Amino acid sequence: MEAVTKHLTHFSLEARELYLDGSVPYLDGPPDPLTFHRHWIAANKPCIIKDALQHWPALTRWTPAYLRKKVGSRVISVAVTPDGYADAVSGDRFVMPEERRMTFASVLDIMEGKEQRSSVFYVQKQCSNLLAELPELADDVEPQVPWMSSALGRAPDAVNFWLGDSRAVTSMHKDHYENLYCVVSGEKHFILLPPTDRPFIPYGVYQPAVYHQRDDGEFEIVDQSGSQKVPWIPLDPLEPDLERFPSYRRARPLRCSVKAGEMLYLPSLWFHHVQQSHGCMAVNFWYDMDFDIKYNYFQLLEKLSQVSGAAPS
């Protein structure tokens, strides 16, 4: 096992030296599809594309007044938590938010401080919630990013809308999608870790549960009985417990902020943790990854990490 751990550590260090950047690079504008595929998708490296959304009407239209008029009466799914941590480890549980149905105008009231709530509200429903729940806003953005769709040879699998409280946190995780994260207003703050740092990232297996707010306003955690346990990362990169997770000392997280009008390319299987400025609005596009190339490669890395002791316990 020591030999496997040693080789994985060496592999991670080599990846940093050979092809990973010490910070997230910027591109000055939308790239050529073939060049983007060669230098970023195939290399599995993140980048921020500037001036990528300037033609989107959303950049100027999506004011509170416009949104109230356009979709104020729309009932949407909203994640509600006591502390902003949704889909995250809490003690010995993997706790998901209470999903509440609310009008979009009610969410805006909370974001603008017109209605005071101690709990944290976050529009984070995925599965193409922009198209499913807010179709009136679809014409304000692109249905797909043309150069990305051309680079991958397919349309996106989902187009998601995000509107967040500044206290809302997306805990560290990874996705099996090529992700283009487009910020329309405010800023998103990312902590990124490459798949090659997997040996340094702890996992556990947890009983799934959900938050439920009682009539007195207090939250309780309700187990989802009969559900399979969930593998998740218990470490908080904002305040990592290095005594409990000493191997994380070897990880080299990248931090970046994505501002309005900018787009983050987040490669599939990169670990990421997300925060945002209050009331930040964003749209992201999920594209299926190339399973034949990336998935098989990083599945091998995952299995080796498990052998070395970095597997879910």
Image (spheres, rainbow, N blue to C red):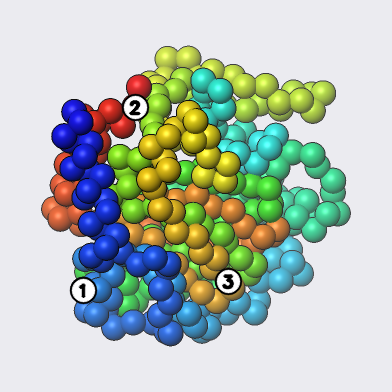
Q: Is residue 85 above or below residue 188?
A: above
Q: Which mark is residue 171?
A: none
Badge 3 amino acid: Lys
The answer to whether any part of residue 132 appears in the image is: no
Q: Which residue is mark 3?
A: 259
Q: Residues within 10 Å of mark 1 (few under 14, many from 20)?
A: few
Q: Residue at x 84, y 49 (%)?
A: 115
Nearest the camera: 114 or 27?
Answer: 27
Marks 3, 2: nearer the viewer: 2
Q: Position of residue 50 (x, y in %)?
A: 48, 80
Q: Is residue 10 above or below residue 185?
A: above
Badge 2 amino acid: Pro
Marks 2, 1: nearer the viewer: 2
> Separation of disc 3 and disc 2 at Cα?
35 Å
Q: Residue at x 57, y 79 (%)?
A: 57
Q: Is residue 229 above or below residue 144?
A: above
Quadrant placement of the C terminus: top left
Badge 1 amino acid: Arg
Q: Residues within 10 Å of mark 3 (few under 14, many from 20)?
A: many
Q: Which residue is mark 2?
A: 312
Residue 237 placement, left or right of 80: left
> Separation of disc 2 and disc 1 at Cα?
34 Å
Residue 4 placement, left or right of 158: left
Disc nearer the start of the sequence (3/2): 3
Q: Secondary structure at mark 1?
A: helix
Disc 3 + disc 1, Cβ < 8 Å: no
The answer to whether any part of residue 51 appears in the image is: yes
Disc nearer the start of the sequence (2/1): 1
Q: Secondary structure at mark 3?
A: strand
Q: Which residue is mark 1?
A: 38
